[in-house]
Image (cartoon, helix red, strand yellow):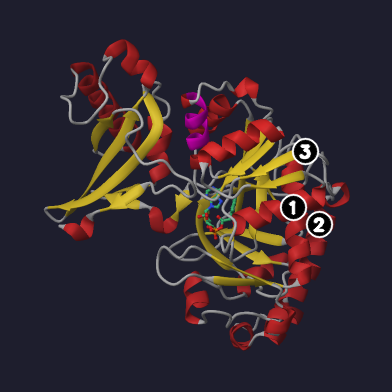
Amino acid sequence: MFWNPSVEQMPRPELEALQLQRLRWSVAHARHGNPVYRARIERAGATEDRLASLDDLRRLPFTTKADLREHYPTGLFAVPLDQVVRIHASSGTRGKPTVVGYTRKDLATWSEVMARCLAQGGARPGTVLHVAYGYGLFTGGLGFHMGGELLGCRVIPMSSGNTARQILMMRDLGSQMLGCTPSYALTLAGALAEQGIQPSQLRLESGMFGAEPWTEGMRQAIEQGLGLRAYDIYGLSEVIGPGVSAECQEQDGLHIQEDHFLPEIVDPASGEPLPEGAEGELVLTSLTKEALPAIRYRTGDVTALTRAPCRCGRTSSRMARIKGRCDDMLIIRGVNLYPSEVERVLLRMKELAPHYQLLLRRERALDELEVQVEVAETFLASAAPGWQSDAEPVPAAVQGLAERARQRLLDETGVRMRVTLRPPRSLPRSEGKAVRVVDLRDRG
Ligand code: DLL
């Protein structure tokens, strides 16, 4: 279903003309509304009257998370604070949180793009939408909530956590679409299995999962474990929240809501724009946002873009699944590695469960990586029944499996890592964004 067919199917020349017109508006708005933006845009000589085509976008200066921190909390806002009707903030695991704001119109835009994304994932008026993203400063819960209400879904604002109650409500209220992080979806699937509930006893049809990187292997595990179709949805607080892009029923790239967000891919090191199809850092420019304009915002997320038409009929550019954040890239003995590449290899081994963690240590001035991953219960049942705890000696079959996993990882990533297999249910379960890398390097 299309939520806004005339926009979603707009011929590209028309869409690009609209983008240029809105880009000029957005630059003028940022310049007139905010002194920091004004100084930068004028210094770059990239005022709206100088933007003759979309290619002139590259004349504009970048904006980064560091800029938002420097002007914390609201120094990059471009409207008077009395027009700001909502505040959110990013979790701020690396320093101060980033505070973002919305006018009434921004909330309407956000609801609109979220309604489109939910429709892409199969939601219709009346669909029971179970929102298990966190509500609060995090944009996940309220973003899904508003989009669902606009579309006419029956929204259940569960927020995250309290897994037993999630399952109870899912059953009793007949949840049809689930929104949560992919790692929490797995936690829910595991809890269902433990309670002996078959996915067919629920009414789940689809789920929209995002806020953290995940892989095709994870998609399969979630689809099987919950009995639904799993779609990827992307966004970030600094640009709006969830709803920047999402997959459609084709599950073949995430459609960017391009009438509101203009995408580019740049080389993360040089900042130079890269051609269509090349992998690099995603940069987004907001075209309609009032309270906090994003002018060439460096997302830090690694992906690639295509404008090739999609079978679904939408004309927007699509982005590939996010591989990871530039700053999450590990460098192990000179080889670059994203945690998602480890996930991709691990989840193709059916003897392993989709629960893993990477431990990073420094040994003799070199970074060393240990992969801890749980063994699948099905493998244990036949190969080493009874192995329940790390305290017990590791059975030979498990040791052999660890060696195979280590070799696979080396073959496919080029990185030598230590593999420790763990018994089922021994690694921490996630309720929100999973912690995939535990950095122990400061601890000697
Ligand atoms: O995570 C917004 C969101 C909520 C997106 C719910 C999707 C679903 P932040 O907390 O500001 O906002 O974190 C944004 O999360 O820059 C990416 O690194 C990562 N991220 C978001 N979606 C995806 C995804 C929300 N589908 C940061 N795949 C972004 C991979 C994602 N990473």
Q: Is residue 111 left or right of residue 65?
A: right
Residue tagged by mark 2? Answer: 15
Judging from the image, what secondary structure is the residue with disc 1 in? Answer: helix
Label 3 residue SS? loop
Name the residue at 48% across, 70% down.
97
- Dividing the picture into quarters, in which one does residue 32 lie? bottom right
Residue, disc 3: 127
At label 1, the amino acid type is Gly
Disc 2 secondary structure class: helix
Alpha-carbon span between mark 1 and mark 2:
23 Å
Q: Magenta stretch mostly in which secondary structure?
A: helix
Residue that carries the numbered disc 1 in the rendered image = 147
The amino acid type, in three-letter code, at marker 2 is Leu
Determine the residue located farthest toward the top in the rendered image: 382
The quadrant of the image that shows the N terminus is: top right
Residue 292: % across, % down: 65, 74
Q: Position of residue 218 (x, y in %)?
A: 49, 33
Q: Residues within 10 Å of mark 1 (few under 14, many from 20)?
A: many
Which portion, as a residue range, is magenta? Answer: 186-193
> Viewer-proximal residue, 84 or 359?
84
Q: Is residue 353 magenta?
A: no
| Residue 294 drawn at (x, y percent) | 63, 70
